[in-house]
Every structure is written in structure tokens, then in C-alpha cells.
């Protein structure tokens, strides 16, 4: 075997391994209302930074693009509530819900909501766009952690904490803990069965569930 051929084989095997460790996650949703373009860019960058260690590549999709198909390993739908430019000076309660993910029959569904208005209230309407974007990316990463890891559990530190402080939302150093990263990887995480959710994504509605068992994973609380 020639040296060049061996080198080529090595490159190929490395690229195959790298590919096997990364899964694409299509994130469907409408753009957040009134979000500054710099904040939007920072939000996307922060979400990708936080989820890269778990082997996830985020593909952002609008709901209008749901007909165009695409071959993704995971599919998640999110929505933003409230205005991301809200200047409301209303006081935030001591504990406020920043986001939640749907759950049915103990199964975490691939749908989550972010309360953008609430997050802006907490950070203040004069918050730097980059700081707001980073905070949004962190809250989104928290919900995606629940969905991909298929767990309601929370951890003591990092993105998978049950409650975020203002500092957690704004500090420059914040990440997923190692246990959560491992749990989100395919070898140990339960499958989020994304392909079976394709129909739900088409309609942007959660699959029908019995109301008696439907609930919420209250997540990303602010304390
Ligand atoms: Zn949570």
C-alpha cells in the first residue's frame, strides 16, 4: 500500500469518525419578535457553542421551510413568546419561568417555548444586544438538553441547572456539565425519535395527548 494511499485512508477514517460523532439538529421556529440582529447572531453562536461538546450541529429553520424536507438526525420546534425589545419596567417575580418544554406520558416532547419578554425584563431594556443574545442561547440550550437527553433531571452546575441567576445568564463562562454532555450523546441518551416527529413539525403542533397526563417541564427558572 502506498504511503499516499495510507494517508488518504487515514484522512477518510478521521472524517468518518468526526461525522459519526456529530448529529444535526434542525431547529424550527419563527424568528424572535423584535430581536436585534446582533443579539440574534450572538444567540445562535452561543447555542452552537454550548451544544457542540454534545456533538450537536444546530441548523436553524423557519416554519416556512418545513416543506422543503432535509435529512436531520434530530428535529425540534421552538417558539418565542413576548417581545424581545420590550421596555416594560414591570418587576420580575423572585422566581419566574423563562422557558418550558412539553411533556406527555413521561416523555419529553421536542417542543419548547422561550419567554423572550421575561428575559428582557430580567436583563433590563438597556441590555447590550450581545448579552441578551447570550442569555437566550443559554435558555434554549437548557430546553434542548431536556429534549435530547430525554430527562427531566437537573444538575448542580451549568446549563442543566434548574434555576438560572442573572449571573448565569450574563457571565462569560457558562457551559454544560460533563454528565449532561454524556447523556446527550447517542451512545447513552435515549433516542429522541426525531423522524417520527416529522408530522408534528409539519403542523407545528404537538402530537395529540390526553390532557390528564400533559404537563410542563418547568425549566430555566430565574431566581
Ligand atoms: Zn429544566
Image: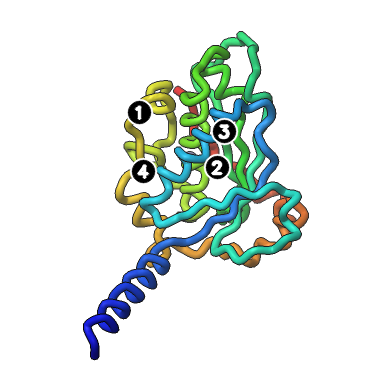
Q: Answer whether labels 2 and 1 touch (C-beta < 8 Å).
A: no
- Of discs 2 and 1, which sits in the foreground? 1
Residue at the disc numbered 3: 40
- Mark 3 neighbour class, 10 Å CA radius: few under 14, some 14 to 19, many 20 or more: many
**Who comes first in sequence, dot 2 or dot 1?**
1
Q: What residue is rendered at 61% in x and 30% in y?
A: 115
Q: Answer whether labels 1 and 3 touch (C-beta < 8 Å).
A: no
Residue at the disc numbered 1: 172
Q: How many marks?
A: 4
**The residue carrying mark 1 has its beta carbon less than 8 Å from ligand 1:** no
Q: For mark 4, give the secondary structure.
A: loop
- Side (left or right) of 203 relative to 184: right
**The residue carrying mark 2 has its beta carbon less than 8 Å from ligand 1:** yes
Q: Position of residue 106 (x, y in %)?
A: 56, 54
**Who comes first in sequence, dot 1 or dot 3?**
3
- Mark 4 neighbour class, 10 Å CA radius: few under 14, some 14 to 19, many 20 or more: many
Q: Is residue 42 above or below residue 150?
A: above
Indicate the quadrant containing the N terminus: top left, top right, bottom left or bottom right.
bottom left
Instruction: Please indicate, yes or no, whether residue 21 appears anywhere in the rendered image.
Output: yes
- Mark 2 neighbour class, 10 Å CA radius: few under 14, some 14 to 19, many 20 or more: some
Q: Is residue 150 above or below residue 94?
A: below
Whole-angstrom CA distance, mark 2 to mark 3, is 25 Å
**Who comes first in sequence, dot 4 or dot 2?**
4
The one of 95 and 14 positioned closer to us in this rendering: 14
Residue at the disc numbered 2: 217
Q: Position of residue 44 (x, y in %)?
A: 52, 40
Residue at the disc numbered 4: 176
Instruction: Please indicate, yes or no, whether residue 110 appears anywhere in the rendered image.
Output: no
Q: Position of residue 20 (x, y in %)?
A: 41, 69
Q: For mark 3, give the secondary structure.
A: helix
Q: For mark 1, give the secondary structure.
A: loop
Amino acid at each position: 500500500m502506498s504511503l499516499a494511499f495510507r494517508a488518504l485512508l487515514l484522512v477518510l477514517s478521521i472524517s468518518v469518525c468526526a461525522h459519526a460523532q456529530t448529529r444535526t439538529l434542525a431547529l424550527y421556529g419563527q424568528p424572535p419578535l423584535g430581536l436585534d440582529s446582533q443579539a440574534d447572531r450572538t444567540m445562535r453562536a452561543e447555542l452552537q457553542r454550548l451544544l457542540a461538546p454534545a456533538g450537536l450541529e444546530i441548523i436553524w429553520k423557519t416554519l416556512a421551510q418545513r416543506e422543503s424536507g432535509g435529512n436531520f438526525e434530530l428535529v425540534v420546534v421552538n417558539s418565542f413568546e413576548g417581545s424581545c425589545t420590550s421596555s416594560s419596567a414591570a418587576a420580575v417575580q423572585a422566581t419566574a419561568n423563562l422557558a418550558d418544554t412539553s411533556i406527555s406520558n413521561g416523555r419529553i416532547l421536542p417542543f419548547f417555548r422561550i419567554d423572550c419578554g421575561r428575559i428582557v425584563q430580567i436583563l433590563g431594556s438597556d441590555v447590550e444586544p450581545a448579552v441578551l443574545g447570550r442569555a437566550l442561547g443559554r435558555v434554549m440550550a437548557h430546553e434542548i438538553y431536556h429534549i435530547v437527553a430525554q430527562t427531566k433531571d437537573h444538575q448542580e452546575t451549568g446549563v442543566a441547572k434548574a434555576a438560572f441567576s442573572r449571573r448565569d445568564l450574563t457571565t462569560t463562562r457558562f457551559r454544560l456539565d460533563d454528565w449532561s454532555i454524556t447523556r446527550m450523546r447517542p451512545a447513552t441518551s435515549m433516542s429522541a425519535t426525531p423522524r417520527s416527529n416529522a408530522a408534528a413539525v409539519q403542523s407545528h403542533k404537538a402530537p395529540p395527548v390526553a390532557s390528564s397526563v400533559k404537563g410542563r417541564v418547568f425549566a430555566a427558572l430565574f431566581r
